[in-house]
Image: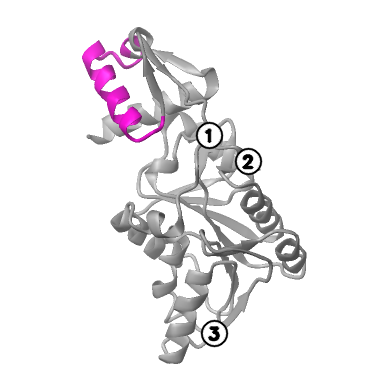
């Protein structure tokens, strides 16, 4: 799929989230392409589980989505996540106190932080904490690691809940690197899990700078629980460029989109 094709698919998802359904004829007119091209886009989006095709168009999937396990997520878009992790690490400076969220994308930041001196990292991710622990034992990481307490979710290898939120109140980090399940211009950044959404929202509120790290599969997707509006975010780092129709909104709210290549 070309970059133009990916951009059109993002727009289709934006439309379907806002209007619940889309028409092949209307989309063909909007993009000035054939109906067959639109049907191909809809086939690809349906194969990804993002919509349901119906006669003459497609509708938003109404049944509940289930958040994939950490192990499942770890195998998806591995190259893209590595590029995002490397780019995200470029924002980190010596002596900073940073938050690294749970998830397979934020974890990719860690290997690129080893040469940054006097870092303090706080995380709610068992996988990220274990990786930093291993680097510490190898004398590759010399900073500090703080692991949040809270309710353990073994399936997703994270902690969250009231205890985690209370602990977070004690910290005001320089930068928070946050994962999401979806993001749209209208509905902001969202999660499939209520506890994760609440914790991420608290992190963003207490951070000097908030950075979303998300591969392109999250763009144009709205999930159940809102974390924050895009205007509350300082940076978004993804492997694809921002949707064209987001540009003015992002610029007017000083939200900077960084494309990892």
**Relative side of 56 to 151, left or right:** left
* Quadrant position of the N terminus in the picture: top left
Q: Is residue 149 above or below residue 70?
A: below
Please count the marks in the image.
Answer: 3
**Which residue does the numbered mark 2 point to in the structure image?**
225
Q: Main secondary structure of the magenta part?
A: helix
Tag in front: 3 or 1 = 1
The residue that mark 1 highlights is 64
Could you tell me which secondary element the residue under label 3 belongs to?
loop
Are the residues flagged by discs 3 and 2 in contact, CB closer than 8 Å?
A: no
Q: Which of marks 3 and 1 is nearer the N terminus?
A: 1
Q: In which quarter of the image is residue 200?
A: bottom right
Q: Quadrant of the C terminus?
A: bottom left
Mark 1 / mark 2, whichever is N-terminal: 1
Q: In which quarter of the image is residue 51?
A: top left
Measured in 3D between alpha carbons, the distance from the residue under mark 1 to the one under mark 2, in whole angstroms, is 12 Å
Q: Which residue is drawn at 36% across and 19% down?
A: 53
| Mark 3 or 2: the one toward you | 2
Crowd class of label 3 (few under 14; some 14 to 19; many from 20; radius 10 Å): many
């Amino acid at each position: 799929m070309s970059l133009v094709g990916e951009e059109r698919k993002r727009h289709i998802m934006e439309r379907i989230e806002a209007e619940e359904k889309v028409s092949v004829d209307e989309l063909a007119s909007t993009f000035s392409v054939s109906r067959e091209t639109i049907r191909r886009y809809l086939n690809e989006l349906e194969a990804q589980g993002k919509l349901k095709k119906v006669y003459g168009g497609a509708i938003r999937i109404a049944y509940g989505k289930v958040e994939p396990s950490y192990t499942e997520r770890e195998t998806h878009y591995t190259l893209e996540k590595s590029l995002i992790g490397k780019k995200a690490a470029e924002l980190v400076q010596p002596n900073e106190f940073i938050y690294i969220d749970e998830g397979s994308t934020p974890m990719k930041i860690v290997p690129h932080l080893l040469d940054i001196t006097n870092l303090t990292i706080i995380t709610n991710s068992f996988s990220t904490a274990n990786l930093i622990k291993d680097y510490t034992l190898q004398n590759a990481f010399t900073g500090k690691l703080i692991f949040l307490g809270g309710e353990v979710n073994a399936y997703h290898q994270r902690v969250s809940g009231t205890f985690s939120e209370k602990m977070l109140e004690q910290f005001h980090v320089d930068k928070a690197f946050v994962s999401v399940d979806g993001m749209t211009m209208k509905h902001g950044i969202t999660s499939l899990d209520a506890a994760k959404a609440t914790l991420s929202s608290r992190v963003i509120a207490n951070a000097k700078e908030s950075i979303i790290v998300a591969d392109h599969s999250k763009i144009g997707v709205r999930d159940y629980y809102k974390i924050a509006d895009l205007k509350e975010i300082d940076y978004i780092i993804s492997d694809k460029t921002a949707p064209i129709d987001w540009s003015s909104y992002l610029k007017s709210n000083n939200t900077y989109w960084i494309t990892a290549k």
